Image (cartoon, coloured by chain):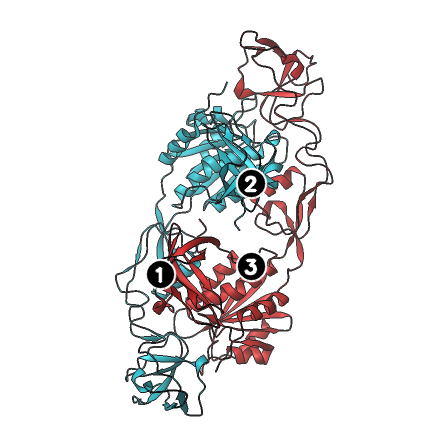
Chain colours: A cyan, B red
Amino acid sequence: MLMPASHEEVVAWLDDHAGVLSSEDVEVEHASGRVLAAPVDTPKDVPDGPVAAVDGFALSAQATVGASDYNPLPLRIKRAGEAMTAADVVPVASGDRLPDAGADTVIPSYETEPRGEVLDIYAPLAQGENVIAAGREARRGSRVLEAGRVLREMDIAMLIELGVGSVFAVRRPEVGIVIIRGDVADADGPMIRALVARDGGSPHDTRHRESEALAGVFSDYDCDLLLVIGGSGLGSNDHAPAALDEAGEVVFRGVAIRPGETATVGRIGHMPVVILPGPPLAALFAYDVLAGRAVRRLAGRPFDWPYRSHRATLTRKIASGLGRLECCRVLVAGDRAEPLAVAEHRTLSTAVRADGFVLVPPQSEGYAEGGEVTVHLYDEY
Amino acid sequence: MLMPASHEEVVAWLDDHAGVLSSEDVEVEHASGRVLAAPVDTPKDVPDGPVAAVDGFALSAQATVGASDYNPLPLRIKRAGEAMTAADVVPVASGDRLPDAGADTVIPSYETEPRGEVLDIYAPLAQGENVIAAGREARRGSRVLEAGRVLREMDIAMLIELGVGSVFAVRRPEVGIVIIRGDVADADGPMIRALVARDGGSPHDTRHRESEALAGVFSDYDCDLLLVIGGSGLGSNDHAPAALDEAGEVVFRGVAIRPGETATVGRIGHMPVVILPGPPLAALFAYDVLAGRAVRRLAGRPFDWPYRSHRATLTRKIASGLGRLECCRVLVAGDRAEPLAVAEHRTLSTAVRADGFVLVPPQSEGYAEGGEVTVHLYDEY
């Protein structure tokens, strides 16, 4: 009989054995979505002098004092490089340095219309309008991005503007996936591979038959985390835990989660190993509770549940057993959540039909109708 | 002088010219994240007969009536294939068909412990417990997934269980990106490429100098959407709109958004074209308002803002100009949002520092301190 460990205990052990990985140098162009291993400080003032924030004409704000619809001030358009006086304007493109000769302000092209060599100004401009002052984007030595940042697309543009060519990013976790094939199609492998990628890992999978010498298969892996799919049960064919025990150490045989009770956790040397149950719904939930979190921790990412949470009121009660973490799939309509039939709780189709799930902790027997719960939403938006 | 069109007008035109693409056959194994172009109906009952939902022992529920801690019922363990009577149990792995001879229920291995050839039953079992009945996952002919579904990881497992080998998925939008280089580093290209990928498109970019014959460059593209970065302004070097006019048609010269006023939209034949301003913050916002939505529409995805929204109270007022859609970056702490200085509104660093942004519509002059606003959050979680 399985004496499953509490999920808190197993998660705590995995947390201890899945710390953030070392870093590697990554070209900024390819760093979107990567996690910074070290902060980035600005190597120089950006911009290094005042630049135009928009396409337009650089001028001295002083020259526009008194301009109005009744008193347009005609300023002369000079070419860049020509000698400029305080009554002249010079065309500039966004990002161009302002000409030195007294220009401190830019009037946007889209707000004006040149009349031959003359630009009529109809309103005074404030000094510095449409100008990015030296160091305004980033001041030399200032911190632009903190360690742990999951780099946004915009960060890449920022780093390029700063002249930063590469960053220290956390290495992508290499996740070995051993798929133990029975006679049925492998429904789990592609799902787990996609989940590992979602969590920032690089999945590497191989398929093996239960009859193989699995201990040797496991030992051949040298990665940051090893996932074994299938063969976790107590049937006579469930050799995976025995093989793990032979190759390394089984630390937890069974975890108090439903579905997913037969999940097994241990290690081979420093490599943590999670054996996931074969039934897809159990594999999914055990992955999410145990393995996904480990992948995200190794990757240096936020490691809580990677689902949007949403508060909702239950339209029916959820009944749950004491002593284990249960996953109840629900339909969501606005701020109401409808539990899907508990009797169906072993079918993957309940998750496919669901909008999300409610976790019922071990110390709870469920939630009453009308109770407010947190739903984790499966879809991103 | 630019007479920008309202963003609503431009978005409506783009919506008309960026409908969902045709479909292609995609192997299920590689379909995670793809969008279904057609619904999937179940080709057969799954399972096709009752199967064990967990590893354990199949038995007849009838044989467990009267079992208790004081009256354990010893049942004989037969091997699969051996003749079975109503007082026997047969080991089964999850997913196995129940043996025909009267077994209707499964007792999980993790709740029991064989004693040699005998299994002691300590409590009655309900008929059908831990069994997935025929057609319970999916009934032949029933709809499993609707068209438009963005396939989840779990859907892949479900499709494999159904024996579905490939699906009709919406073709990935091919998005051409023409980067017009000035003398500065190309900060926009990698950012826009990553955003296109986020929105489900396949980016293809080439770099060109402003001095090139851009109309020919544009005409050479044959893709679902063409993005041109830079050269949208009114400076003397801003040839992109003129080149678009030569190669096809400029429909909107300027869009009433800030930043991003000089964005230009048109088409070459059936191919919609969006010219994004070069300054990265403007490129980002114009991409998000105009181009990203078009990519998501082409891809058949939900095309609203691809950011989590969050209600928050403003700690300071937001002042905005009438007549244009403005993007105000904010810091978020719990349910409070702090606008970042408006004076900095042309610097990318304000977005990098921000947690998200508030949209101020054209007909609004902003929001008062204490007002409740919707923040679009940049980070996923």
* Residue that carries the numbered disc 3 in the rendered image: B201
Q: Which amino acid, mark 1?
A: Arg
Q: CA distance from mark 1 to mark 2?
A: 35 Å
- Closer-to-camera residue (A245/A234): A234
Say which residue label 2 marks. Answer: A337
Q: Secondary structure at mark 2?
A: strand
Q: Are marks 3 and 2 on the same chain?
A: no
The earlier-in-sequence mark between 3 and 1 is 3
- Above or below, A268 relative to B89: below
- Find residue B316 and name its label: 1
Q: Where is A370 relative to B197, above or below? A: above
Image spot of residue B169 (x, y percent): 64, 52
- The picture places residue A208, in percent across and down from the top left corner, at 55, 33
Q: Is residue A140 left or right of residue A251?
A: left
The residue drawn where x is 69% and y is 21% is: B99
Name the residue rendered at 63%, 15% in the picture.
Answer: B89
**Residue type, numbered disc 2:** Ala
Mark 3 chain: B
> Vertical placement of B19 versus A130: above or below?
above
Q: Nearer the viewer, residue B166 or A151?
A: A151
Tag 3: amino acid: Gly
Q: Position of residue A125 (x, y in %)?
A: 35, 80
